[in-house]
Amino acid sequence: MQIYLDTANINEIREAASWGILSGVTTNPTLVAREKGADFKSVISEIAELVDGPISAEAVSLDGEGMVKEGLEFATWHPNVIVKVPSTTEGLKAVYQLARKGIRTNVTLIFNASQALLAARAGAFIVSPFVGRVDDTGVDGMQLIREISQIYKSDPEIKTKIISASIRHPRHIIDSALAGADIATCPFKVLQMSMRHPLTDRGIEQFLADWKARS
Ligand code: G3P
């Protein structure tokens, strides 16, 4: 399973890219808005300089035609740009039209397996089921990844990838891999948490103490 970073923060992307673990980046309007005053095109272009992999940029139109128009513009920014559209019937229209023009899409805000199946049928490159937000409703978010994975695997025509999104903690990453996700898109903080373990810290301290004390 590949790891993407779910952020529009350039410093976080630069740092995670230096670890050699990043295969792509996802953004959404909330994440871009958090980077006060940043111009959307400049942010996406800068990310594309740092990470050689798919970079999702989200359209904000609600109608398919508007999404296609935005998507066509995003696609001129960099060949790695993936156009993110919401999981609505208008979103499906945009996916279908953009796919016919060879432009890859990420269908976001997926909350059930039928949305994922229809997005794949329309020609989505990626779907983004939001596991954390499903968990928030008291339902097991990971079950959604399992169902989509099973449906996609049973249909040789479907090449759509599954991004496990709305990741909240390190266990979500592991469970996503076990449930059949192709990618987990993670907040920077969760990636940092994933690499921390008190026994690792204690082991380093012990090794250094023994090294200094050697005769
Ligand atoms: O990738 C989707 C993500 O940005 C949403 O995460 O934590 O707001 O549900 P969250």
Image (cartoon, helix red, strand yellow):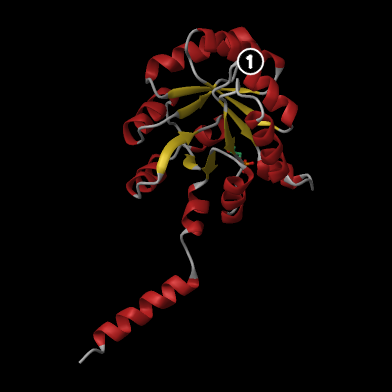
For residue 62, say whether it is visible. Answer: no
User: Mark 1, residues whose alpha carbon is within 10 Å: few (<14), some, or many (≥20)?
Assistant: some
Q: Which residue is at 64% across, 11% downward?
A: 93
Nearest the eye: 93 or 74: 93
> Would you identify the image quadrant in which residue 200 lies?
bottom left
Mark 1 element type: helix
Residue at numbered disc 1: 122
Ligand 1's quadrant: top right
Where is residue 168? Give x, y as percent.
Answer: 61, 50
Pointer 1 residue Cβ closer than 8 Å to ligand 1: no
> Would you identify the image quadrant in which residue 156 lies?
top right
Tally of marks: 1
Q: Which residue is at 51% across, 38% downward?
A: 34
* Quadrant into which the C terminus falls: bottom left
* Left or right relative to 3: residue 213: left
> Would you identify the image quadrant in which residue 164 lies?
top right
Q: Label 1 is placed on what type of residue?
A: Ala
Q: Which residue is at 45% across, 25% downward?
A: 40
For residue 184, say whether it is visible. Answer: yes
User: Compared to 214, does 90 lie above or below?
Assistant: above
**Quick one: which residue is furthest to the right in this view?**
138
Where is residue 16? Give x, y as percent.
Answer: 39, 47
User: Compared to 198, does 133 lie above or below?
Assistant: above
* Left or right relative to 163: residue 136: right
Where is residue 78? Give x, y as percent.
Answer: 37, 21
